[in-house]
Amino acid sequence: MYMTASDIHTTGMMARASSTGLLDEDDETYLRYYLIAYWVEATLFGVYWFLYMVAMAIIYKRRAQSQSTPLISIAGNTFLFSLAGLHNGVNVYRLLKIYGSPSGATTSTAVAVSYLRNNKYWDVYIHAILLHFTTWAGDSFIMYRCWILWNRSYKIMLLPLAILMASLGTGITSIYWFKHQDKIDSSVMRYIFRTTIILNLVGNTLTTGLIAYRIWKQHRRSRKAGVHSSSGVDLFTLMRIIIESASIYTLAQLLIIILFFRGHPSTLIVQHASIPVTGIVFVLIVIRAYGASRAPGGGRMTSKFEFPTRLRTSHELGEGDTTDNAQEGTSSSRTLDTS
């Protein structure tokens, strides 16, 4: 009997290996949830496509206005969009392969599920790889923003980086196991999958928390310096935008953990949805930050409002005197970069 772990999650990821006992579901149930997952992901990708185009238009508009946007923002968002597009395209290919041929209408459920779970096929195996790469890319992107925001402090990033390295280790092990399932016992892989999804949630929450804390810290220092209407309120708005947008990804991670530990087949739906959701989080920050800067009074917020989240805070958030640093923030240092 073949074994499959056709779904691993990210935003690190996890596997579905029914025949090994990791998830107990019959062929009809699996196919039903796979088809739902396909349409959910396709719908979310359509939303993602629209938001991505809007975000890129904003970024290029700002570049044309000489408000420089880091190339990492364009490259990172484009890479995530490409991964989501490739995964969605592979899903279409797989369904066409099953039902698109002249004999597709008579394809039995058992044959269809056998194909969808067989990692010997490249289009099945690549599913797990793309899930992992989407998670690693998203985590790396947000870690880069956090690193910039904390004045390129490697000390601050030690724990998030360690979590990412652990996720890479468990993810690479999972990818290897999909092709060599006789090399590692499935009971061992069960713990590796569980560890991976927990690492994803912890790493994302920690990094987002560090970003929010850094902005909140500047918000308080600005208020102490008497800068209430321009710097303080706007920094608080930025913090809210980042937390609210990131919470979408965090919710997906939490749902995967709950459903996977319960062994529920709907885990497959959330896994597929997590690929476009990861990219949606980042383009939402770009769009919402731009909208906030264009709102009445928003033009007074900052001279730049781009991405990735970057406060030019070498002085205002330094370790020196709080009052002097905050006063510095009332002038040139109040530049925000969130694209």
Image (cartoon, rainbow, N blue to C red):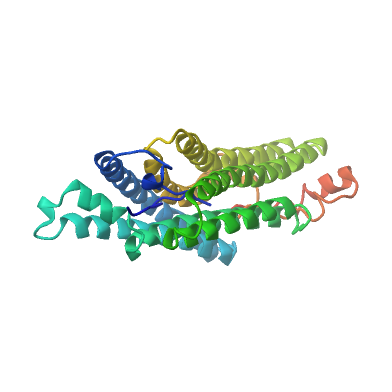
Using the rendered view, name the quadrant where residue 100 is placed.
Answer: bottom left
Furthest residue in direction right, as rendered:
321
Nearest to the observer: residue 151 or residue 126: 126
Work out which quarter of the rendered image holds the C terminus and state it: bottom right
Nearest to the observer: residue 178 or residue 157: 178
The answer, for residue 22, to whether it is visible in the render is yes
Q: How many marks?
A: 0
Q: Which residue is rendered at x = 31% and y = 49% of the image?
A: 42
Position of residue 207 relative to residue 171, above or below, is above
The answer, for residue 57, to whether it is visible in the render is no
Using the rendered view, name the quadrant where residue 89 is placed.
Answer: bottom left
Q: Which residue is rendered at x = 55% and y = 38% of the image?
A: 244
Nearest to the observer: residue 257 or residue 139: 257
Using the rendered view, name the quadrant where residue 69 is placed.
Answer: bottom right
Q: Percent x, y for residue 82?
A: 41, 62
Position of residue 77 relative to residue 266, above or below, is below
Q: Percent x, y for residue 111?
A: 21, 52
Q: Percent x, y for residue 158?
A: 74, 54
Q: Which residue is rendered at x = 26% and y = 43% of the image?
A: 27
Relative placement, left or right, of 273 versus 69 is left
Nearest to the observer: residue 213 or residue 255: 255
Q: Percent x, y for residue 166?
A: 63, 54
Relative placement, left or right, of 239 versus 49 is right
Relative placement, left or right, of 218 versus 97 is right
